[in-house]
């Protein structure tokens, strides 16, 4: 999974709205991660039977990474000149939960990651595509994601003083991450 966007959002919610709302956000994310992990297992089964499709998907991923990198750098530059005003907003638990689900749905990078992981494990002989392996994988993906998000929430809640600096550079970090993924995809496609 590529959790950078979700981790940073969990940390940001923790720093701005509190730890409780960040946990609700994380639960929403984990429900979507479980669904995506299940879908990824089924996609992996399909790709295992049709390996020629993988090259087309990598070319599509290259375009997506380039667009995401451009967006994050543009958003960071746009945000750079503005001074952030502190606003106190009444936020419900339900809003945080559904925001987590929404961002979980937008984070489609988990699908190729889980597909690749399943394919690797299938080739290694660690899994077969039976319901026990699928259930174990889905539950592990969801609980692992929640654990990582909770660590981010806890860590950034302790460093609440530095949250403005974190918010200032988070888009640059995500932009660099997308560029790195783009370079790795180019290397993998053309080597």
Image (spheres, grey):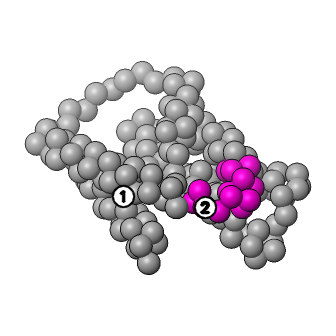
Residue wearing tag 1: 178
**How many other residues sit within 10 Å of disc 2, few (<14), some (14-19) or many (≥20)?**
few
- Give left or right: position of 33 versus 60: right
Camera-nearest residue between 52 and 87: 52
Q: In the image, which is nearer the foreground, mark 1 or mark 2?
A: 2
Camera-nearest residue between 152 and 6: 6
Camera-nearest residue between 107 and 120: 120
> What residue span does the magenta drawing correspond to?
40-54
Residue at horizontal 51 percent and vertical 56 percent from the top = 56
> Can see residue 7?
no
Camera-nearest residue between 16 and 75: 75
Where residue 6 appears, as percent x and y from the top left, is 48, 47
Residue at horizontal 88 percent and vertical 51 percent from the top = 131
Residue wearing tag 2: 52
Residue at horizontal 44 percent and vertical 78 percent from the top = 191
- Give left or right: position of 53 versus 139: left
- Give left or right: position of 59 versus 176: right
Where residue 163 appears, as percent x and y from the top left, is 32, 50
The overriding secondary structure of the stretch rendered in magenta is: helix
Where residue 24 appears, as percent x and y from the top left, is 58, 36
């Amino acid at each position: 999974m590529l959790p950078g966007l979700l981790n940073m959002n969990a940390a940001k919610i923790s720093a701005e709205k509190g730890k409780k709302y960040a946990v609700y956000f994380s639960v929403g994310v984990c429900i979507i991660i479980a669904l995506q992990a299940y879908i990824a297992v089924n996609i992996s089964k399909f790709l295992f039977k049709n390996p020629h499709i993988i090259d087309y998907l990598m070319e599509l991923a290259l375009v997506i990474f380039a667009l995401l990198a451009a967006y994050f750098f543009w958003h960071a530059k746009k945000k750079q000149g503005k001074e952030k005003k502190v606003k106190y907003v009444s936020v419900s638990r339900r809003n945080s939960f559904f925001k987590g689900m929404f961002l979980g749905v937008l984070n489609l990078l988990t699908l190729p990651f889980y597909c690749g992981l399943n394919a690797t494990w299938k080739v290694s002989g660690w899994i077969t595509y039976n319901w026990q392996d699928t259930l174990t994988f889905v539950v592990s993906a969801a609980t692992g994601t929640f654990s990582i998000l909770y660590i981010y929430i806890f860590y950034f809640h302790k460093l609440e003083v530095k949250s403005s600096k974190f918010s200032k550079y988070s888009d640059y970090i995500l932009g660099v991450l997308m560029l790195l993924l783009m370079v790795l995809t180019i290397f993998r496609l053309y080597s």
